[in-house]
Amino acid sequence: MNAPLTLSAELRKLVEARLEQTLRGIEDTFNQILEKQEITPEELKEELKSLEDSFNILFQKWNLEILYTLLLKTTVGFSELKKTLSINSRTLSDKLKLLKAHGYLHREVCAGPPLRVEYTLMRKGKNTVLLALPLLYYSSAI
């Protein structure tokens, strides 16, 4: 049967060890930018508004789980995703369409019989998962 989708303890320790360094680097860069330019409340509001769609997509139930599964498995069929995540077909179909429409994953229909649909991560999807992992580890460790 399918093994649980978890990172090995060694890889998890590596991610956690690098997280502090990454956070310091991001904070330093952010502070340098803020020192060089002042941001008005209107500009801040506009900047946050531009990020809203991405936040809404990524933090909907199942979306990060789907992307994470594709990162670990590379190419996955619809049925395998459904079984791995224990998600109903309609919800999975809707989430896959949304993620495809926003450029996170690629959908390929493979000739049959039987007809098979496979999903793989696009660069945007892979980068998103890689950036989200440390955030998820950090927030779960607090």
Image (spheres, rainbow, N blue to C red):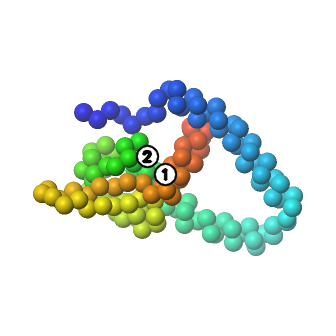
Residue drawn at x 61%, y 33% as measured from the top left: 16
Q: Secondary structure at mark 1?
A: helix
Residue 110 or 70: which is nearer the viewer?
110
Categorize mark 1 by other alpha carbons within 10 Å: few (<14), some (14-19), many (20+). Answer: some
What x and y, as percent, mark residue 13? 57, 28
Number of callouts:
2
Q: CA distance from mark 1 to mark 2?
A: 6 Å
> Residue 21 got which mark?
none
Q: Which residue was labeled with disc 2? A: 71
Residue 135 appears left or right of 41: left
Could you tell whether 19 is left or right of 100 in the image?
right
Tell me the kind of residue under disc 2.
Leu
Who's the residue at 12% across and 57% down the image?
A: 113
Residue type, mark 1 in image: Lys
Q: Are marks 1 and 2 in contact (CB under 8 Å)?
A: yes
Image quadrant in which you'd find residue 18: top right
The C terminus: image quadrant: top right
User: 10 Å neighbourhood of mark 2: few (<14), some, or many (≥20)?
Assistant: some
Most distant residue in the left direction: 113
Instruction: Say which residue label 1 marks.
Output: 126
**Residue 61 visible to the viewer:** no
Tell which circle, 1 or 2, labels the residue nearer the N-terminal end: 2
- Where 77 sits versus 95, above or below? above
Q: Is residue 140 visible to the viewer in this orientation of the structure?
A: yes
Residue 43 vs residue 20, the one in the foreground: 20
